[in-house]
Image (tube, helix red, strand yellow):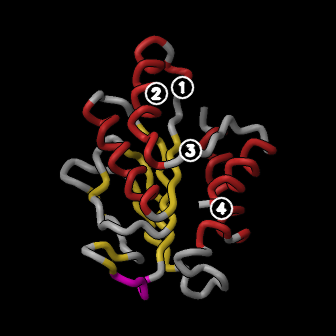
Amino acid sequence: SRGMDTLSEELAARGVDASSMNFGYAFEIADGLAEAYQTDKSVLPIVIIGHSLGANRALSMSAYLAEKNIPVRLVVLFDGTVPWSVPANVQEVLNFYRPDGACVVQSCTGVTVVGAPGFKGIIDNKDVTHIPGTGHLGIDKSPILHEEVIEKVLSVLAEK
């Protein structure tokens, strides 16, 4: 998802320690966060952002961190393909989706998410149908959504 690369660069340009990785590295990244968290809580707040399969992985990564009692401050999803339940360790979710998503082999775009048992955070499922260029292959590249995410991430970091 090249839009995630761009978003990472935009965040970095605003002073945020951000990087973009293939979703296949999610658990390696989570293990690194878990290891760092054990000795240095300054890795907080943890923000995880993903598009499509990467959005799915953002929530499974959060669940993996929940098993290690590590809080996740914010998860941002760009048109995930599986209606995951948000684990209780996540404080807030911003889920951009289009309800007119397509389905292929038990996987559909345009899904909303709900909290798992024990979840007490905030979930904002945002239908972005009205925003031009936000089909499944363009949603991650939307300058409008990027700006919303950047503002959200900067506000989370300001809480520190």
Front tag of 4 and 2 = 4
What residue span does the magenta drawing correspond to?
99-103
Tag 3 and tag 1, C-beta contact below 8 Å: no
Task: Determine the image quadrant of residue 124.
Answer: bottom left
**Residue 156 x %, y %:** 59, 44
Residue count near mark 1 (Cα–Cα under 10 Å), binned few <14, some 14–19, many ≥20? few
Q: How far apart are marks 4 and 2 (CA)?
A: 23 Å
* Chain-order first, disc 1 or disc 4: 4
Front tag of 3 and 2 = 3
* Chain-order first, disc 4 or disc 2: 4
Please name the residue that numbered disc 1 is placed on.
43
Q: What element carries label 3?
A: loop
Comparing 42 with 79, the one in front is 79
Prevailing SS of the magenta stretch: loop
Q: What element carries label 1?
A: helix
Name the mark on residue 21: 3
Comparing 157 with 61, the one in front is 61
* Residue in view at x 50 percent, y 15 percent: 40
Please name the residue that numbered disc 2 is placed on.
33
Q: How far apart are marks 4 and 3 (CA)?
A: 12 Å
**Residue 25 x %, y %:** 46, 40
Please name the residue that numbered disc 4 is placed on.
3
* Chain-order first, disc 3 or disc 2: 3
Q: Distance between the residues labelled 1 and 4?
A: 24 Å
What amino acid is at disc 2?
Leu
Task: Determine the image quadrant of residue 34.
Answer: top left
What amino acid is at disc 4?
Gly
Q: What element carries label 2?
A: helix
